[in-house]
Amino acid sequence: MAPSDIRQVILDILSRIAPDEDLSNLDDSVSFRQQMELDSMDFLDIVMELRKQYRVQIPEEDYPNLVSMDSTVKYLTPILKDTPAK
């Protein structure tokens, strides 16, 4: 899966978790929590959706890699490189 596909996957997950948020102006370099009203349960929902959809196991110590779109895509690119986009 290409980084652009991974970005879209994350956007899709975010739109389901926070349907009232406007994701069109999301700054990829700024943390999700600074831009959106996400709490820790929402963050865990992102992790669970990745596990459910792509069977990606993200260890708790790697959660800091998922704070922004840039860091999330960078972290997931090697993990999902052989996964076809849906």
Image (tube, rainbow, N blue to C red):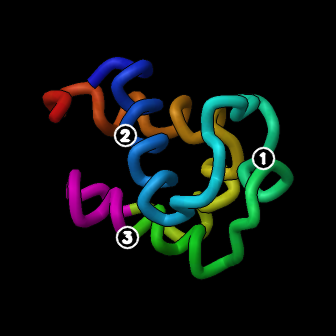
Left/right of residue 84 with respect to residue 58 in the rendered view:
left
| Secondary structure category for the residue under label 1 | loop
Q: 28 or 54, which lies in front?
A: 28
Q: Could you say which quadrant of the image residue 12 lies in? A: top left
Q: Position of residue 17 (x, y in %)?
A: 49, 65
Type of the residue with mark 3: Met
Q: Position of residue 6 (x, y in %)?
A: 39, 32
| Secondary structure category for the residue under label 2 | helix
Quadrant containing the C terminus is top left
Q: 68 or 74, which lies in front?
A: 68
Does the magenta segment cover residue 64? no
**Residue 29 drawn above or below residue 20:** above
Q: Which residue is denoted by mark 2 in the rendering?
A: 9
Q: Are marks 3 and 2 in contact (CB under 8 Å)?
A: no
| Secondary structure category for the residue under label 3 | helix
Quadrant containing the N terminus is top left
Type of the residue with mark 2: Val
Which is more N-terminal, label 2 or label 3? Answer: 2
Please name the residue shown 22% across and 52% down the image: 54
Nearest to viewer (mark 3 / mark 2): 2
Type of the residue with mark 1: Ser
Which is more N-terminal, label 2 or label 1? Answer: 2
Please name the residue shown 74% across and 56% down the image: 36
The residue stretch that appears in magenta: 49-57
Q: Badge 1, how many Cα within 10 Å: few under 14, some, many 20+?
A: some
Please name the residue shown 60% across and 59% down the image: 20
Q: Position of residue 35 (x, y in %)?
A: 80, 49
